[in-house]
Image: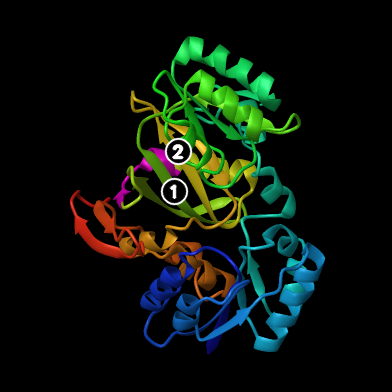
């Protein structure tokens, strides 16, 4: 049976993910891939069986468009990226026309994960779950943020700031005694800022009602766990250790972080595909950084473990596999990517794989 899968407007790495999905398919499986974006995308059009340009629409209008798209193209599975909160509210309507919508949970869960302070507070209120949460201060406006920075610097020296609700590294800055340059402060560089540079930056960039988080700067490796779950039960997680520069990753074996992701999945009743991030301190203690209610851009890299999570998410959604069918990932691979395209250049087994 042909299975029609739709990737709606989403990550720039989606072409890599679609190519990995074709590689993951078993003999005899027939996935027809549909993709859409708000702009023309030769890369997407080249790897998808069908490509369509989306219009910029509000939430309700987008749901109506998506339902029409699903029925026009007999879509069986929608891996939702854009408007995933709105789409999650209408899963029953999509199911009624034969389409399973994959999101990280309900609208309430997806919206909850936009703010870090609420996540940290919920984990703490649940007894910590054995998961370290970084010390932080929330502040609104430039003056209060500067006061929070001064407070935490007395205990931790170097600190960092970021909007409480922001995607990826947007708005992230480091504050230390080793400043960068005023040009770097405003062009998006992650160069450290002095207190004087930080005051100028906040005065120009942070409005009085914008909530900022101030935390100790954690300089250790970042662990990005790509996760697949079913209604609050983790099925599999793949740990990608990310190195500075963004061109090298290690597919690591960290049962402790996988177990932490499982506890978070149960606490928040997460579903489908999402990403949990941990950051190590200089002492090697992993701290919870954030949970992204979507696939990470590097999810396709995890396919090199032999387990491409979106492939298994599709099979779980259409009922051709159960959670026990999903194999354990092979770990220990050192991955290097091209600077321009971010395509994988080399994948070398450098550590023993998990048993």
Residue 11 in view:
yes
Q: Name above or below for residue 257 compared with residue 40.
A: above
What colour-coding does the image apply?
rainbow
Say which residue appears at 67% left-offset and 77% top-offset.
99
Report the residue marked by disc 1: 225
Near mark 2 (Cα within 10 A), the count class, few <14, some 14-19 or many ≥20, is many
Say which residue appears at 19% left-offset and 58% top-offset.
348
User: Which residue is at the front of the view, 169 or 25?
Assistant: 169
Disc 1 is placed on an element classified as strand
Whole-percent x and y of residue 156?
A: 45, 15
Residue 278's disc number: 2
Whole-percent x and y of residue 86?
A: 75, 61
Tell me: 93 left or right of 173.
right
Whole-percent x and y of residue 89?
A: 76, 61
Residue 34's disc number: none
User: Which residue is at the front of the view, 349 or 53?
Assistant: 53
User: Which residue is at the front of the view, 208 or 99?
Assistant: 208
Seen as rendered, the residue at the extreme top is 154
Q: Contact (CB < 8 A) between labels 1 and 2?
A: yes
């Amino acid at each position: 049976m042909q299975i029609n899968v739709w990737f709606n407007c989403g990550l720039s790495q989606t072409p890599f993910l679609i190519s990995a999905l074709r590689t993951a398919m078993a003999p005899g499986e027939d996935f027809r891939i549909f993709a859409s974006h708000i702009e023309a995308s030769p890369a997407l059009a080249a790897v998808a069986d069908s490509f369509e340009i989306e219009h910029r629409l509000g939430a309700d209008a987008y749901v109506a468009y998506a339902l029409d798209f699903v029925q026009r193209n007999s879509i069986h599975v929608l891996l939702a990226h854009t408007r995933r909160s709105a789409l999650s509210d209408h899963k029953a309507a999509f199911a009624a026309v034969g389409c399973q919508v994959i999101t990280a949970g309900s609208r309430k869960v997806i919206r909850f994960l936009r703010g870090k302070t609420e996540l940290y507070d919920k984990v703490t209120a649940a007894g910590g779950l054995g998961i370290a949460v970084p010390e932080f201060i929330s502040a609104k406006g430039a003056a209060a943020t500067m006061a929070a920075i001064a407070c935490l610097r007395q205990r931790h020296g170097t600190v960092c700031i970021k909007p409480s609700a922001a995607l990826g590294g947007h708005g992230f800055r480091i504050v230390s005694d080793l400043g960068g340059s005023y040009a770097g402060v405003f062009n998006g560089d992650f160069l450290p800022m002095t207190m004087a540079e930080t005051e100028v930056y906040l005065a120009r960039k942070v409005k009085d009602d914008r909530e900022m988080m101030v935390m100790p700067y954690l300089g250790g490796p970042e662990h990005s766990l790509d996760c697949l779950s079913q209604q609050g039960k983790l099925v599999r997680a793949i740990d990608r250790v990310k190195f500075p520069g963004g061109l090298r990753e290690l597919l690591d074996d960290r049962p402790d972080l996988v177990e932490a992701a499982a506890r978070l999945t149960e606490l928040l009743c997460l579903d489908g595909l999402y990403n949990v991030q941990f950051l190590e301190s200089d002492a090697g203690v992993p701290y919870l950084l954030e949970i992204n209610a979507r696939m990470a851009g590097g999810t396709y890299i995890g396919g090199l473990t032999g387990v491409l999570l979106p492939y298994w998410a599709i099979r779980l959604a259409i009922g051709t596999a159960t959670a026990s069918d999903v194999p354990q990932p092979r770990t220990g691979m050192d991955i290097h990517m091209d600077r321009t395209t971010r395509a994988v250049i080399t994948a070398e087994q450098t550590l023993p794989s998990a048993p």
